[in-house]
Amino acid sequence: MHAVLIHKFGGPEELKYEETADPVIKADDVLIKVYAASINPVDWKIRQGLRKGAEAVFPMILGRDVSGVIEQVGAQVTGFRPGDEVYSCPDISRDGTYAGLVAIRADEVALKPRSIGHELAAAIPLAGQTAWQGIFDHGELKAGQKILIHGAAGGVGTMAVQLAKWKGAYVIGTASEKNIPFLKELGADEVIDYNTEDFSEKCKDLDLVFDTIGGETQAKSLKVLKPGSILVSTVGIKDPEAMAAKGVKGVAYMAHPSADQLKALADLIDEEKLRPVVSKILPLKEAAEGHRISEEGHTRGKIVLQVYPSMTLEQIEEFIINFPLFF
Ligand SMILES: NC(=O)c1ccc[n+]([C@@H]2O[C@H](COP(=O)([O-])OP(=O)(O)OC[C@H]3O[C@@H](n4cnc5c(N)ncnc54)[C@H](OP(=O)(O)O)[C@@H]3O)[C@@H](O)[C@H]2O)c1
């Protein structure tokens, strides 16, 4: 198969599009023909050698999101068969999805949303599961509560805004000015421009802050939370003592694969209650360009890597240019 591999840590130029051996499945795996993958910041953090605790085995195939078609099932797999259209966020310890084929444990896979092509489905798994686990499992968000989402226009943030609205929360997001109309269209009740406004002056008595930014943004968030509230972060908790002193529960977490959550996300998409946000689709061999863009830190939604087309160029162009009118 063809795949994008790294042979050592380094810059985007280390991503090499090469011929490599097909993966071999285990008894509880499925083999997926990858139609599309997508880029997450963790991909370039791994590529740079920044992810602590990760064992470096080269060559390494990056990528945590896939949408594709099952080619083969392992001897112990009962829930899937060849031809099923599926999507997944596979375990980070194995080879990733920037490839023609990927072997994934069947219990990390779900049927993809029926109503969208692979290019859009590949945008969902990691960001969708991260948002779901952050605001529901760790953040315990309930209808009627007020949530502030930092990084609302990003891959995780665009999922979190929509899921929080679906739950019945009042949603405030932070983003730059260019993303304000887009986020309101997506469902945010208020959007605060982090370049010109101070969210800590504009918000108070919130139930939950979902932080995908960290640093000073996280530190200032303590001012807007009420006692007994929760701050959940995808990038670590900087000052747990300050949170405890304010009576705020601080939670840092690593998202884990969940087929049940993928199924719930697919249902929401098919019911038109959740929509993927994709700002760019590149051929797999241009993964390095995708990393360069993602590393700038201002991607709206997701960047997708296409292996086999499932949507026409016209459909894709219309989707990207006319977003959010695609439904
Ligand atoms: N713990 C986990 O399991 C987990 C899982 C997924 C992601 N993560 C981490 O969570 C972080 C976010 O991931 P992601 O995929 O959402 O990243 P992303 O898509 O690259 O986020 C880009 C977005 O961040 C926004 N942004 C940049 N600076 C901002 C600021 N100061 N305030 C508010 N928004 C700002 C940008 O909006 P503008 O263009 O409007 O500035 C852009 O839309 C990354 O560090 C990632 O590694 C962790």
Image (spheres, helix red, strand yellow):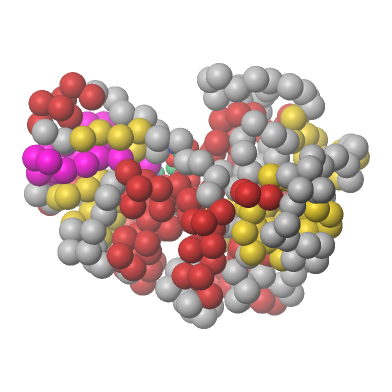
Question: Who's the residue at 25% across and 45% down the image?
Answer: 209
Front residue of 113/98: it is 113
Residue 73 at least partly seen: yes
All told, the count of numbered labels is 0
Residue 313 at least partly seen: no
Magenta residues, start to end:
211-232
Image position, residue 3 (x, y; %): 81, 42
Image position, residue 69 (x, y; %): 77, 61
Question: Who's the residue at 17% across and 50% down the image?
Answer: 207
Image position, residue 259 (x, y; %): 56, 54
Write down the quadrant of residue 293 in the picture: top right
Left or right, residue 306 beside residue 108: right
Residue 136, compared with residue 309, is above or below; it is above
Front residue of 136/202: it is 136
Write down the quadrant of residue 25 in the picture: top right
Any magenta on residue 224?
A: yes
Q: Tell me which image quadrant ligand 1 sits in.
A: top left
Front residue of 308/142: it is 142
For the N terminus, the quadrant is top right
Left or right, residue 273 beside residue 187: right
Question: Who's the residue at 33% across and 68% down the image?
Answer: 166
Residue 175, compared with residue 91, is above or below; it is below
Any magenta on residue 215?
A: yes
Image position, residue 254 (x, y; %): 45, 36
Question: Who's the residue at 62% across and 59% down the image?
Answer: 110
